[in-house]
Amino acid sequence: MSLAIFDLDNTLLDGDSDYLWGQFLVERGLVDGAFYERENQRFYDQYRAGTLDIYEFLTFMLRPLASNPLAELLNWRAQFLEAKIRPILLPRAMELVKQHRTAGDTLLIITATNRFITEPIAEMLGVPNLLATEPEFVNGRYTGRPHGIPCFQQGKVERLNAWLAATGHDLAESWFYSDSHNDLPLLSQVAYPVAVDPDDVLAEYAQERGWPMISLR
């Protein structure tokens, strides 16, 4: 049985769920619009450039979770999923997941985006296992701080290794699908790395190493 690992944003989705959550909050007037939109774009540009300070970003991104009661957050998230996520589900991505499921592979999404946003998206995609950045949750509220190792760059490798040890899986026949050069640490660990609609850096790296490149668009 193989392990099929998928990045989420701009891989299985035709967009970035973290960035879109920020847009949703701005559009609904739930955060300071001008400031939040500017910072959201700044961090997204840094992510694409490979220069993102994940802890600075998480301080920004997790603040709305800490500033609002859980019931309100869950209501907003339900609206967000319908308004922003369902329109960017990719039929070809769903088919790829189905192919691995039919083959009997273990399915896993691994993403830097926090679990509050991504857990219901993984459910929409029919992927039962999720490794995501964990927002700290204490006494029924989010604190605005991350819990444990952020699931980003080398952190994805560390989080995956811990999951492998806990579940008994291994990387002997593993696949990993990603669009981003930020995932090169993990792409370099699996048996079958696949670049999906890759950014320029990943495309060049994949071409040099003979990795397959596919499009789910």
Image: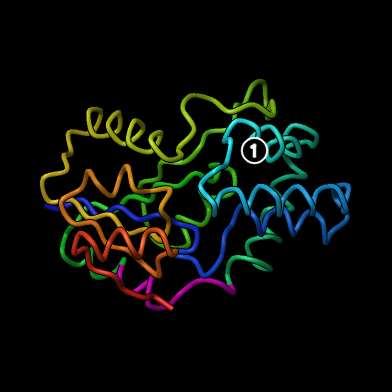
The image shows residue 80 at horizontal and vertical percentages of 68, 60
Q: Which residue is mark 1?
A: 57
Magenta span has 158? Answer: no
Magenta span has 92? Answer: yes
Magenta-colored span:
87-96
Which of these two is toward me, 92 or 158?
A: 158
Horizontal side of 211 relative to 147 (left or right) equals left
Which of these two is toward me, 84 or 174?
A: 174
Is most of the magenta stretch helix, strand or loop? Answer: helix
What kind of element bears circle 1? helix
Disc count in the image? 1
The image shows residue 192 at horizontal and vertical percentages of 18, 56
Q: Residue at x 30, y 52 (%)?
A: 5
The image shows residue 131 at horizontal and vertical percentages of 41, 41
The image shows residue 26 at horizontal and vertical percentages of 82, 56
Residue sitting at the far top? 139
